[in-house]
Amino acid sequence: LQEVTASSRHYVDRLFDLDPQKVLQGVIDMKNAVIGNNKQKANLIVLGAVPRLLYLLQQETSSTELRTECAVVLGSLAMGTENNVKSLLDCHIIPALLQGLLSPDLKFIEACLRCLRTIFISPVTPEDLLYTDATVISHLMALLSRSRYTQEYICQIFSHCCKGPDHQTILFNHGAVQNIAHLLVSTSYKVRMQALKCFSVLAFENPQVSMTLVNVSVDGELLPQIFVKMLQRDKPIEMQLTSAKCLTSMCRAGAIRTDDPCIVLKTLPCLVRMCSKDRLLEERVEGAETLAYLIETDVELQRMASITDHLIVMLADYFKYPSSVSAIADIKRLDHDLKHAHELRQAAFKLYASLGANDEDIRKKIIETENMMDRIVNGLSESSIKVRLAAVRCLHSLSRSVQQLRTSFQDHAVWKPLMKVLQNAPNEILVVASSTLCNLLLEFSPSKEPILESGAIELLCSLTQSENLALRVNGIWALMNMAFQAEQKIKSDILQGLSTEQLFQLLSDSDVNVLMKTLGLLRNLLSTRPHIDYIMSSHGKQIMQAVTLILEGEHNIEVKEQTLCILANIADGTTAKELIMTNDDILQKIKYYMSHSNAKLQLAAMFCISNLIWNEEEGSQERQDKLRDMGIVDILHKLSQSSDPNLCDKAKTALQQYLA
């Protein structure tokens, strides 16, 4: 290192010369020495050139020419490795360059902006450095009108530093839309492109920006029309893709309808074209991911995409060799594509998940694509977390099909790798994987048995204790599916795994979804007589407490209806009935709901009564007498006159039990 740095030392020494002219010449020589030479850049940084260059850049006494050349050299150093950028950031280069933007000299401003642009597009630079001083953004907006270079660099800085809703709001409130819109028709391609990129990040998942863009016009043409022109096949791919992203964001935000011709006839076909195998890897990845987002929630767009250009078959190529044969001439490209092949797989899984989200025929086509199930199963155990997540999403989408659960999912024992994924995955994977497990545990799915044997109950019970709401819902939902028409042992295992404490915890959960699924679980556990009696003999006291708790609480109609249905199930037990008959508080509640203003609740309460007074069962006479003394028969007479045919029938049937 010493020998190498010695030959570079004279460049740094000249920066300290007393003659300003020699300093300037030294900076120019340094500029020429570092262009394209990473070793030289590293040497000069080690030798301490950066603080001196920054000092000269900020000195009022330095000539504008010297300050400009310093900014150029610093920009060149920033073009090197990420370590170079870190060294520049450590020397507080950003405040120095931002200060430089206040100069009146345009050439110097452009040099500072170019250097800032290079630093901000580096992954090691924190975006927030752009927003620390509120005046910076408004000053940059003002500089947009100075030259095509200020336009290009500032738009590029904005599009790289706009990460998330907070940044979008700051830029939006500083007039980004108005200030950047007219740049879309600039004579410079680079300016048009950077402006377009700005809009694509500003509008992403942002309804406020999207709704504004729809109504902005430039030279009498609305922005969506300008975007559509930029989508055309004769435009560079980068421009087609970016404008498709803008239109996609606007569509997802509800600013453009999903059946608008600019989506159906322009954006969607453009994105499908990007998935073709003669496109570059990055283009195929971005095309597929954007298309997946565009069609994610709209079944008509899903159907349309599925029949455009044989898309489903075309995506199968994403799992094969990453480059088409013609591109292999470039060995660097080949190396790059092999390293990034996992991104293709991730994008394909995402798009398959969106395509198959709603339509049974599309799911069938996807599953019939060559080796599809094997690919998903392999994807579940890939090292890349993004691929794993996308594969689980794809599996979840396909698991919504009853037909596939019975066939392909069974043939490929998908539950095995899925259970493995559930062992210790991060939350975002757990949420989707547990949703998929819910589907695999439906009563008609043949996977149910082996999943139970592999320790699912314990796993799901632990999910119900998660801080994450979606995981709690999925855990209890899967248990509910598992308990449906299950044998007694499984039901006992579930109750044991959950513990009474946890059951009460779930029944007092603040989320109504968790509460409804827990009630659904209880209802499924308490079905078929022997099971009802068995479970109530061991857990009766706690379950009755829970029912009381809910009927007394502030809950919506659905929750109370579900709770009354659980009571009706208990009333259907042989010995379990007594837990209701000996509980006057519960009997009064049932009576109250028989006269409730909501017919659903009245009906549910009547089911309880019918099950309690049914003639053919032991002790029915005593039960009938007790309920008559409570005034139940009078209510039944009143209900038998009801205008609601369901209530009327149910009441008459119940009264017949008294007559028999």
Image (cartoon, rainbow, N blue to C red):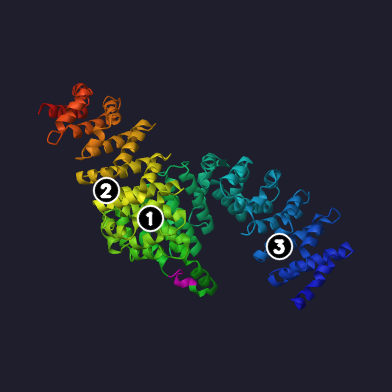
In the image, the segment drawn in magenta is 321-327
Q: Which residue is mark 2?
A: 484
In the rendered image, the vertical position of residue 632 relative to residue 580, given as above or below: above
Q: In this image, 7 relative to 186: left or right?
A: right
**Mark found first going from the N terminus, 3 or 2:** 3
Q: CA distance from mark 3 to mark 1?
A: 48 Å
Residue occupied by mark 1: 459
Question: Nearer the observer, disc 2 or disc 1?
Answer: 1
Residue 373: horizontal and vertical position, in percent? 34, 63
Give the Cα distance between marks 3 and 2: 62 Å
Q: Which mark is residue 284?
A: none
Residue 323 part of the magenta-drawn span: yes
Q: Amino acid at mark 2?
A: Phe
> Where does residue 287 sit, x and y in percent of width and height?
47, 57
* Residue designated by label 3: 87
Q: Identity of the amino acid at label 3?
A: Ser
